[in-house]
Image (cartoon, coloured by chain):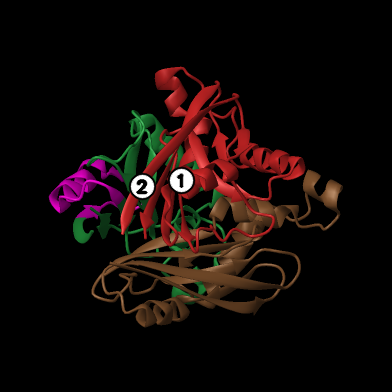
Chain colours: A brown, B green, C red
Amino acid sequence: MAVYSDDFSFEMAKGTDIVDITSRILESVESSSVKNGIVCVFSPGSTGALTTIEYEPGLVHDLGNALERIIPEFLEYRHNERWHDGNGHSHVRASLIGQSISFPLINGEIPLGTWQQVICLNLDNRSRTRKVIVQVVGE
Amino acid sequence: MAVYSDDFSFEMAKGTDIVDITSRILESVESSSVKNGIVCVFSPGSTGALTTIEYEPGLVHDLGNALERIIPEFLEYRHNERWHDGNGHSHVRASLIGQSISFPLINGEIPLGTWQQVICLNLDNRSRTRKVIVQVVGE
Amino acid sequence: MAVYSDDFSFEMAKGTDIVDITSRILESVESSSVKNGIVCVFSPGSTGALTTIEYEPGLVHDLGNALERIIPEFLEYRHNERWHDGNGHSHVRASLIGQSISFPLINGEIPLGTWQQVICLNLDNRSRTRKVIVQVVGE
């Protein structure tokens, strides 16, 4: 049994920026040499999020659009009244989606669906460097 | 320490079909012979999801109803404009709920609440075969 | 490789009560003596939830407010018609947020963001004792 840690970072645009990180995660998993176990993917920070989607431009737009309908940017947020950074909506959206996903690792592969990619979302109202940590436990 | 993989598949109806998969997960865990560790449950695909609920018909209806209020089927989705399969809402709902849950495994048991079941949701607008993978790491 | 289990319980107020459990989780992790691996945090029950947030009073209010907008307490819920406990909204909110989060454990630390805390939510319409289980697998 082994534990392996890797991470990568990248710039993300403000607003709802959504990036496909599947291939980067698979690189980390491959470099671990672990073939079977659990892969825990985590992005630190309270205005970013991780989830999966069929990564095509239509859905990337639709997901951002849905977040704006569900948690509108221009409502009154007490966070904004206190801190005046205008990103109350970013925090609430991030809390709803979450920053952690775990996957089975089977024969060196993560069994994603054919049309399923892992995405990182920057929900902040300013550009941010997002870090993604890939933690592998297995053999 | 051991790594154990199991999976099971089943047919799900179109719309918001919700199935209790708790007993199937527990069977997989039992067949692993692992007593303590982490159980990662994952369902591949971008129009399905996993979460927990008190599985009774009222709440099963209420959850589907809430999803229809939050992410209505009949809005404009760019995914539908591009692909004409009419399931843009299914994808967005799936991205919000997620397809992965991990549980502690303690003395051979998953410590769910008394009224808490693990459910698989088919959110697609057509019937689908859903696969659930149960990955156990522990001793 | 080792598996370590710990848990702690506390009283939570009715409505949307939100408590920062970061330091309690870190205590459990420290007592495990495991330095590298995966930490799975789980709260049993179908009207509670776990996620992360920047834990400051403004955002704690904003998150509760957003949940009330998205899943209002005073709609018709079939759960309430059947069970008359008036907490249909609590269950639906809990299913959307989830009760499980996993974190990488690296050199004895969970790599949370600077302004990121792990929170437990009581979403029930009555006060509840909430239990949080911290499961560590690693070395």
Find residue A131 and report its horizontal and vertical position in percent. Answer: 59, 71
A95 vs B127, left or right, is: right
Residue B123 seen from this side: no
Tag 2, which chain? C
Q: Residue at x 55, y 41 (%)?
A: C24
Asked whether residue B34 is drawn in magenta, I would say yes
Residue B139 seen from this side: yes
Find residue A52 and report its horizontal and vertical position in percent. Answer: 46, 66
C84 over C70 or under it: above or below: above
Mark 2 and mark 1, same subunit?
A: yes
Residue at the disc numbered 2? C4
Find residue B82 and report its horizontal and vertical position in percent. Answer: 49, 76
Tag 1, which chain? C
> Does the residue at mark 2 contact the one at mark 1 (Cβ under 8 Å)?
yes
Question: Which comes sooner in the sequence, label 2 or label 1?
Answer: 2
Residue type at mark 1: give it.
Answer: Ser
Task: Give the image quarter of residue C125.
Answer: top right
Residue at the disc numbered 1? C31
Q: Residues within 10 Å of mark 1 (few under 14, many from 20)?
A: few
Q: Which region shows up in magenta?
A: B10-37
Give the Cα separation between the discs numbered 2 and 1: 9 Å
